[in-house]
Image: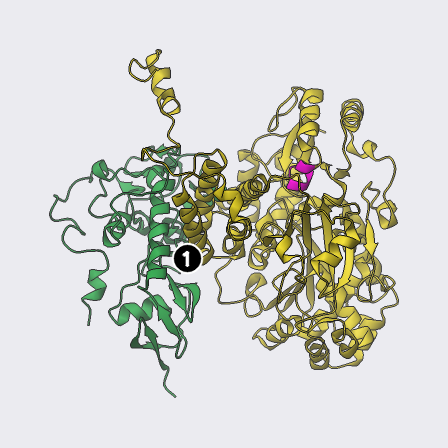
Chain colours: A green, B yellow
Amino acid sequence: MSDKITFTIDGVEIEAEKGQTILKAAENAGIYIPRLCAFEGLEAHGSCRVCTVLVNGRPQAACTQPVAPGIVVENETPKVLNVRKRIIEMLFVEGNHFCMFCEKSGNCELQAMAYRYGITAPTLPYFFPKRDLDMSHPDIFIDRNRCILCGRCVRASKDLDGKNVFQFVGRGIDKRVAVNAEARLEDTDISLTDKAVDVCPVGALLKKRVGYKVPVGQRLYDHKPIGSEIESRE
Amino acid sequence: MKDNLQEAVKEITSANGNDSCRMIDIVREVQSRFGCVSDEAIDLIAKEVGTARVEVESTVSFYAFLSKTPKGKIIIRLCNDIIDRMNGFDVIAEALQKALGIDFGETTEDGLISLEETPCIGMCDQAPAAIINNEVVTMLSTDKVKDIVSVLKSTADPKKLVKRLGDGNNANALVKSMVQNNIRRKDAVIFSQNNGIESVALEKALAMSSVEVINEVKTARLRGRGGAGFPAGLKWEFTRGAEGTDKYVICNADEGEPGTFKDRVLLTELPNRIFEGMTVAGYAIGAANGILYLRGEYAYLYDYLMSIIRSRREQGLLGKDVLGKKGFNFDIRIQMGAGAYVCGEETSLISSCEGLRGDPKNRPPFPAQKGYLGNPTSVNNVETFAAVLSVIDKGAGWFAEMGSKGSTGTKLLSISGDCQSPGVYEFPFGITINQLLKEVGAEDAQALQIGGPSGQMIGKDDFKRTICYDDLATGGSVMIFGPQRNLLEIVDYFMEFFIEESCGYCTPCRVGNVILKKYLNKIMQGKGEPEDLTILREIGEAVKLGSRCGLGQTSPNPILTTLEKFRQVYDGLVKENAEGFRSDFDIQASLAVSKNIAGRESAIFT
């Protein structure tokens, strides 16, 4: 017996390796399932939920759900797309996202995902929360207005950098990313070369003095939608 | 007591083996001695147990009973659940504020008393109620409030509040509480037994092979009593078959679903049965360790439960070679919770046992494969353990004859709200709502909330239906609402509860519930449009479908089930918006900040 199994995504039969997640198997087959908390090289988090798919009719996060022989996965059916769009909208309205002057614009995964799914402006009520900035560190800053609580920085610092710079505190809608110091990023052992600094999908954790460096027109998502790099794979 | 923080932390952490897995015990103790877990304390704890300070802060910030800022020596936590609201929460709240001279969230100037609200404390049959440090006060009235505050002010000792003791073991020297059991109906499975001291079931179980024990539970078709109804025998079989030599049995006594309190009564009256059931489970799955996860609200039972564990050890019912069975070692520890509803979800509960914030874990792997500290773990409800003993004692056949086809045996129901006799009822599965209402004295009920906020609200059309897993499933909570109640106010409260209790890990539950409440409130204010009902349903479905654990997967239920069953209530409140303006937009509220900065009224929008 080989370790290969087959199953379908939106009717297309694909081959996968046993133990793979649905997200990974789809990716290998050139099918994009959107994700914000998942990141190559980091353990799956299962928190953003934009990768929600239906597996034999049951909702599952594609980033954590392993493949199984013969499962029927719905990825781009109307029901799934509706849920996804709503989740993307939720991420916009719970924070303060001003794409027009954000230095991450054009390279932002959340923004790119909204465009991919045809969301030009959220229809849900904005929360306008009061959130803080941490500019204490000479080279790195945190803007919590833009944080989507994906936990990439938390995991990267721990698992890739061998540090513990970030962790979640609080719960519910008041949950936020805290740093390993009484208050300031400056008082942690973070360094500019840490992997954690490079994984933020939005503009919440950024390096100073590099904003707007890439001109409009040459940014990551200026010409192709997010996910096209996976869809062009063969 | 002027403890030196540094020395105290050292003493507390070392008493817990400097083990970060015991973090909840450590921070609970620091909280209780110093009135908070301050930044300084967090640093010290992190250093002692060898973890990052932000990890300690993460845990502390998660639980409602822990605080980074100083609280009073005495904390009054007034229960704000819907039943308490129906029984005069507002009046009691006002009386407390007046008597103490402070608002909720504040502490008296002398640092003696803090006043807080807390969700359901498991006393709905004797509401309004409050927890004062670890003491429970029930059936509150304005007179009682005056008395309570004066005793606290003069003695600074909540223990002095205890006057007339409750019934049964509530009067036990180690419990000494004023709580009442209110056991209203007994049936064959749970309350027919004595409290299990003779240990017939355990002896019987140990005479069987562990596979035979599991088969017996499977044959009885015993399903989990927490509400989800997963077959208990199957769960044990999976855990038994999972790879790993170190296995765990966990008893979920985090009875947090608003409106349920039957586990509190079981823990009070039949603790031996519960511990014995856990021991049988340990034997069946090959576990040497059990954990009773006791919600923080039931801390008043801790000493008593510990004494039962100790006495079982002395009798050879726990420990090495249980009842002389060579090679079967099993012991139990109690893990205290610290105020978090989500910890009733089994993977959150495991996180909490590990000393972490109570975030649920990703599944798979399931706890049966990788649970507590990565080991195979079976998490079962308090009542499930109590029912297991009857299965072993009297046989699977006897058990399976009771109840209905898919739901064998009996169920403990916690009945509260608008009825004559609130309390704990043991009924065979399959009883109709009409029968139930007759027995509890609530034949004029307008609506029932079955299974707590995460369950469903039903109206008269459904009173012919039956309580069982295949029809109206419940972990035990049944709240009754009379004709005078405003159903949307109830729904609104339930949504507020879920917003408070969401762990915030996944987007749909963290954000979606807040959005649902915003739309609900818009409708309740008469500003809703018919389209808002469609949005409510759509967002509700997205939260149900997208959420990671049972909390978010059920949190839209109050809205979705009332939209289905009581549509006319919503329809009567929404109206077409002919102008097309946003009806909930309030220009003055939106201008408030600017007006404040400018120091004048708007010249245009007056």
Indicate whether residue B410 is drawn in magenta: no
* Residue A3 seen from this side: yes
Q: In this view, does A130 lie above or below B355?
A: above
Q: Where is residue A47 in the image (x, y as percent from the top left)?
A: 42, 54
Residue in the picture at 67% in, 35% down: B77
Does residue B72 appear in this view? no
Residue pictured at 77% horizontal, 38% vertical: B138
From this viewpoint, which residue is outermost toward the top?
A: B600
Nearer the observer, B446 or B147 = B446
* A173 with respect to B327 (left or right): left
Residue nearest the observer in this picture, B599 or A167: B599
User: Going by the image, does B558 lie left or right of A34?
Assistant: right
Q: Using the image, determine if residue B225 lies above or below residue A149.
A: below
Which of the chains bears the disc numbered 1?
A
The secondary structure that dominates the magenta segment is helix
Image quarter of residue B90: top right
Q: How crowded is mark 1: few (under 14 residues within 10 Å), some or many (20 or more)?
A: many
Query: On the image, which quarter does residue A104 sit in?
Result: top left
For the view shown, which residue lies furthest in the bottom direction?
A1
Q: Where is residue B438 shown, x and y percent of the image?
A: 77, 54
Above or below residue B365? Residue B565 is above
Q: Where is residue B415 in the image (x, y as percent from the top left)?
A: 73, 50
Q: Position of residue B315 (x, y in %)?
A: 86, 64
Q: Give the residue type that dot 1 points to.
A: His
- Quarter occupied by the C terminus of chain B: top left
B493 vs B593, left or right, is: right
At mark 1, the secondary structure is: loop
Which quarter shows the N terminus of chain B?
A: top right
Which residue is labeled 1 in the image? A45
Observer-nearest of A139 and A39: A39
Numbered circles on residues, count: 1
Magenta stretch: give its range.
B80-86
